[in-house]
């Protein structure tokens, strides 16, 4: 779609991408950390969930979204999606960015989440829940092994959790069944788990249910604030990128689903009166 010759060069908004609604949990915290910045949020709701899709499809869909956000004027795109970070980020950074525009940046959510573990875990036993794609990719295990080789990781895939959010069942009694079962299966792997990573940006939308079934004393890590702090730090260390961000305190919302459907849940979650536009990604 877009190429190096057609991309806008003037400063633009920060792009935030997720397969669906989950990235809103990250956007909310980033907007809090960078209140003046402009943002474009893109949710590929029509094709969510990504978590059960093949490596190749997640890569193709994510690349389409990144190209779209670049074409909208973004110089910096945050993949606010663990599945996309696990399955597409490295290929996009290494294979696609040099040809699209080597000065634009795409950042993921896994690395900043792993970086803070040293500060929060005492036992070094880390439980991770995520989509089947994120868990199968072993991205968390590998990142943790690199930064904290003495730590032990325990993972569990929760294939029903994203659909519960996307289909607005997160607060229903039915959600308790799946959340309880999956939390118990994760924690049964080690009595010493003291930190549980919610390794999917949709999962904070189930936090009330999750907190019911995780015993006190276990830290439950949501990624929004972690990613927001890491982004603020990144921009501080990279003034050349900071200069490419416009500062009008606005957010535009794009979705591949029906715009009114997206807006009603986003409104509820962000506590804002937002409008969304429907787009086609190809
Ligand atoms: N929010 C995405 C993540 O962090 C959900 C992926 C999906 O669509 O299954 O992995």
Image (cartoon, rainbow, N blue to C red):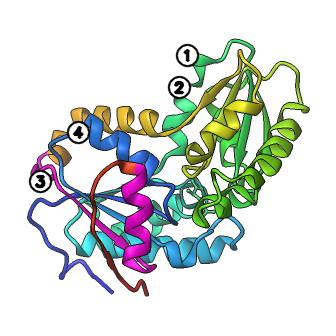
| Of the image marks 2 and 3, the number of the one nearer the N terminus | 2
Asked if the residue under mark 1 is in contact with the one under mark 2, i.e. CB atoms within 8 Å, the reply is yes
Residue 13's quadrant in the figure? Answer: bottom left
- Give whichever of discs 4 and 1 has the lower sequence position: 4
Instruction: Estimate the spatial distance between the alpha carbons at disc 2 and disc 3, rounded to whole Å.
Output: 29 Å
Q: Quadrant of the C terminus?
A: bottom left
Magenta span contains residue 254: yes
The Cα atoms of the two marked residues, 2 and 1, are separated by 6 Å
Q: Which residues are magenta?
A: 243-269
Q: Residue at x 30, y 69 (%)?
A: 69
- Residue situated in front as seen by the camera: 249 or 273: 273
Q: Which residue is mark 4?
A: 34
* Disc with the residue nearer the chain's start (4 vs 2): 4
State the residue at coordinates (63%, 29%): 220
Q: Nearer the viewer, mark 4 or mark 2?
A: 4
* Residue 251 rendering spot, x and y as whole percentages: 23, 58
* Position in image of residue 18 (x %, y %): 47, 61
- Binning the other alpha carbons within 10 Å of mark 4 as few (below 14), some (14 to 19) or many (20 upward) gives some
Whether residue 67 sits left or right of residue 108 in the image: it is: left
Q: Is residue 85 left or right of residue 174?
A: left
- Residue 29 — which label? none
Read off the residue under disc 1.
119
**Residue wearing tag 2:** 116
Say which residue label 3 marks: 246
Question: Is the C-beta separation of discs 2 and 3 under 8 Å?
Answer: no
Question: Alpha-carbon neighbours of circle 3 within 10 Å: few (<14), some, or many (≥20)?
Answer: some
Is 270 located above or below residue 45 in the figure?
A: above
């Amino acid at each position: 779609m877009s190429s190096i010759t057609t991309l806008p060069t003037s400063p633009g908004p920060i792009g935030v991408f997720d397969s669906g609604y989950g990235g809103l949990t990250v956007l909310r915290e980033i907007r809090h950390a960078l209140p003046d910045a402009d943002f474009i949020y893109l949710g590929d709701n029509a094709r969510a969930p990504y978590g059960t899709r093949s490596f190749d499809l997640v890569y193709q869909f994510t690349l389409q979204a990144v190209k779209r956000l670049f074409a909208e004027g973004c110089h910096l795109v945050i993949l606010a999606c663990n599945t996309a970070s696990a399955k597409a980020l490295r290929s996009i950074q290494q294979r696609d960015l040099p040809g699209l525009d080597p000065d634009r940046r795409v950042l993921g959510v896994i690395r900043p989440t792993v970086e803070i573990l040293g500060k929060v875990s005492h036992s070094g036993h880390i439980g991770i829940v995520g989509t089947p794609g994120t868990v199968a990719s072993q991205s968390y295990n590998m990142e943790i092994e690199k930064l904290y080789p003495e730590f032990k990781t325990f993972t569990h895939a929760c294939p029903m959790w994203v659909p519960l959010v996307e289909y607005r069942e997160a607060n229903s009694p039915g959600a308790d069944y799946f959340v309880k079962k999956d939390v118990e299966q994760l924690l049964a792997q080690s009595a010493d788990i003291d930190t549980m990573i919610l390794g999917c940006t949709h999962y904070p939308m189930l936090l009330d249910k999750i907190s019911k079934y995780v015993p006190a004393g276990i830290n439950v890590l949501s990624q929004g604030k972690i990613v927001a702090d890491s982004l603020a730090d990144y921009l501080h260390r990279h003034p050349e990128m900071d200069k490419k961000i416009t500062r009008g305190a606005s957010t535009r919302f794009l979705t591949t689903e029906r715009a009114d459907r997206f807006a009603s849940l986003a409104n509820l979650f962000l506590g804002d009166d937002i409008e969304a536009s429907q787009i086609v990604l190809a």
